[in-house]
Structures are given as structure tokens and as C-alpha cells.
Amino acid sequence: MRVPKKLTIGVTALWAVTAISACAPASGSGGGEDAPEEVTVGVVTSETGPLAGYGEQYLDGFKAGLDYATDGSGEVDGTAIKVEYVDDAGDPDKAVTSAKELIGQDVKILAGSASSGVALKVAEQAAQNEVLFISGPAAGDPVTGINDYTFRSGRQSAQDVATAGTFIDDLDGKKVMVYAQDNAFGQGNVTAVEDVLGAKGAEVDSVLVAEDVTEFTPFAKQVVAAEPDLVFVAWAGATSGAMWQAMSQQGIFDSAPVVTGLGDAATFGAYGEASEDISFLNHYFPDAPDNEINDTMVKAVEEAGGTPDLFTPDGFNAAIMIVEAIKEGKNDVPAMIDALEGFTFEGPKGSNTVRPEDHALIQDMYHVKLVEKDGEFEPELIDTVPGDEVAP
């Protein structure tokens, strides 16, 4: 597949059920007299703070997924699943405090994390206290394989970069500039570009911007002055619109080829005049998959008053994984880990597989474009990229 010559690479951090009983993964014979009456799951994610929107998407998906995976019962094989929801506000220290409090209450399953910095800290707590942790939208690659106790329910930066690599021409000898936030997510994207595109012969450089910056013109000028052949933008949160505006004003779309990751619906109008000239890689938008589970999730979230978005499947997948862990492992953490390693299941994006050796979640990704309809931009699917082609 070929990309238009005018192309900039960017990744924007770039998410009542009608249960499908025949597909629901809660069926089985994992119960027995050893099954506990109740298991508590601690969901620690951003309900406030800079990534609150991502946390909301995740939680909408999680609640719909738990209903789906338990056939609406909230239990699996006689074990009731109780959920404690905690707001980390995107603050790693607050997340660690909350995780410790939950673990002190004998909670053995943690989930959530919209922020990669938060996920890394909670993963440390999971290993130290030997509890299961299923990370959410946090995309930083270091989360994968960090320890035996940490799993993913979404994609990671290396899958974004590998997806971009499937529709980019020969990069041998070309200069790729990574323009990103100076945080775990942005740094992870730099590493991913070095590993994935650098392996194809690209020379990789970067411009990293502190998270509290609100004036992006000086940094956009740095990117243009470097005269790159490609620019890869890794960005998340509320400053995306201002960042892209500065890029447009500095003429980046005229000076370098551009590919960007398509984020959540709030970003669809953020690319300005360049919107229809950019080739986007994408983790999820509601019309991308074509399957019953996605239809079920979309319907459930909408009926609950939410809007399905970029990270909604991550919450839905997490619920499926938790139900599987409890069904097969009861409340025994080593048994839950054994149950999830190599676990293949159908989710909103289709087939997902937990890679046993590092707990990466192998899944399909998307190549999309933005099209203008009635004065607004909407995503349109160009191609589905099979998960095994973009495995991290």
C-alpha cells in the first residue's frame, strides 16, 4: 500500500447490553467448591486530569465488557465480581497509593492506567505484591514484558509504528524526525521508531516537548529546520489541537511527508487544512471493525449514555481477560497468570492473543483517512492491518 507523497508521521495517543450468549467467554466449567464467593477487582484509572477522556472511554468499555463476559450476571461460575473504581488523576504517586490501599484490602486484580507513567509504577507494585495487573490504554512499550504479573488489554506504541511501516515506502537512508511529548508515552515512541523504522535503514532523531508547554511554535520550527524526510508525531491529551495548529502555521505539511495516528473523536477536527492529506494509522474507531461483539459494545455504551471511542475496546478487553482469569484461576494469582498467557479471545476488534512470553496483546490495526461530511471530519477505513504483521 502506498501513501501520498505529502505525508507526516504522527501518533496521537495516540477509547444495558444484549449479550451474545453463544460468544460470551464466561461459559465453561472453571468453577467448583474452591471458587470464592466474591473477587474484588480494583480499577485505577484517570477520571480527572489531562487524560480523563481516555479514562472515561476505558471505563465505558469495561462496564459493557463485564456485562457481556458474564452474560449480565456480574459473576462467573458462582463467583461474584465486585469492582472498586479509583481515580488516579493521571498522577503516578496517587495511583501507587491507591494500588497499595487496594492490595492492603486483599485485592489481587488491578486494572486501568490511561497514562504510561502510571502503568509503569503500578506494574512495579503488582510485581512487588504479587498481584495481577491488566494495563489499559497506556501505550508505552516498556510496560510490555516488565514483569510476570503485568498484561495489556490494548495496543502499544510499537504496534502504532509497525502499522505506519506497512504503508510507507523504502526508508533506507531517510531521516525520520519524532516530534513527541517528553513523557513515557513520547519516549516510548522514540524507542519504537528507532527499533522499527530504524531497522529499515532510517536515521531517527527527535524533538521532545515538556507536558506543561502550551506554546508550540518554537518546537515546530525546530522540526522544520531539521529538514526531515518524515515526521512522526506522538501526542496525547488536550494540547493536541494547539500542537497541530502550530505545525500547520510553520508549514510542516509542505516541507515533509506526514503520517499521523488518529486519536479519539475529539481530535478529528484538530488537523485543519491538512486533514484530508494525512494518512492515519489507527487503533480503533467504532465503524472500523465489522463483527457482532463490536456491535454489542457500541450499543451497550450508547444505551448507557456514553460514546464509543478510541480506548473503549481496551476496557472491554480487560473485562473479558479478568473474567477468564477468575474463571480459570479463581483468586490464585499464579493460576490467573497461567490462564491468560496464550489466551486467545474475540473482542470488539476481532481476534486478540496474549503473547505468552511478554504479555503483549496481538491485535489488528487500521489504516484510515479523514473525510469531510457536513462540515465535520469523520474517519473512513482504508485497510485493516492483520495483527501478526504489526506484532511488537
Image: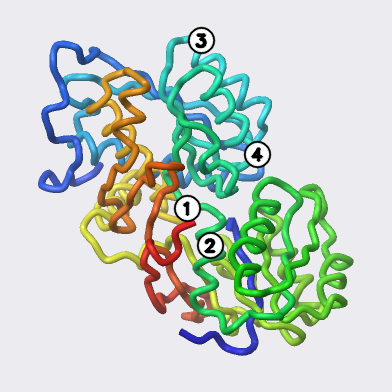
Mark-to-mark CA distance, 3 and 1:
30 Å
Q: What is the x, y in percent for residue 342? A: 31, 43
Answer left or right for 195 relative to 242. Answer: left
Amino acid tagged 3: Gly
Which of the two labelled residues, at mark 2 and mark 4, occupies the earlier sequence position? 4
Element type where label 1 sits in the image: loop
Marks 3 and 2: CB-CB under 8 Å?
no
Tell me the crowding category of disc 3: few under 14, some 14 to 19, or many 20 or more residues within 10 angstroms, Cα based: few
The foreground one among 143 and 272 is 143
Which residue appears at 26% of the width and 34% of the height?
324
Kindly identify which residue carries mark 1: 155
The CA distance from mark 3 to mark 4 is 22 Å
> Disc 4 on helix, strand or loop?
helix
Q: Which mark is on residue 160?
A: 2
Locate residue 146, reporting x and y percent.
55, 36
Q: CA distance from mark 3 to mark 2?
A: 36 Å
What's the distance in space between the residues labelled 2 and 1, CA to CA? 8 Å
Distance of label 2 from label 4 (alpha carbons): 18 Å
Q: Earlier in the sequence, mark 3 or mark 1?
A: 3
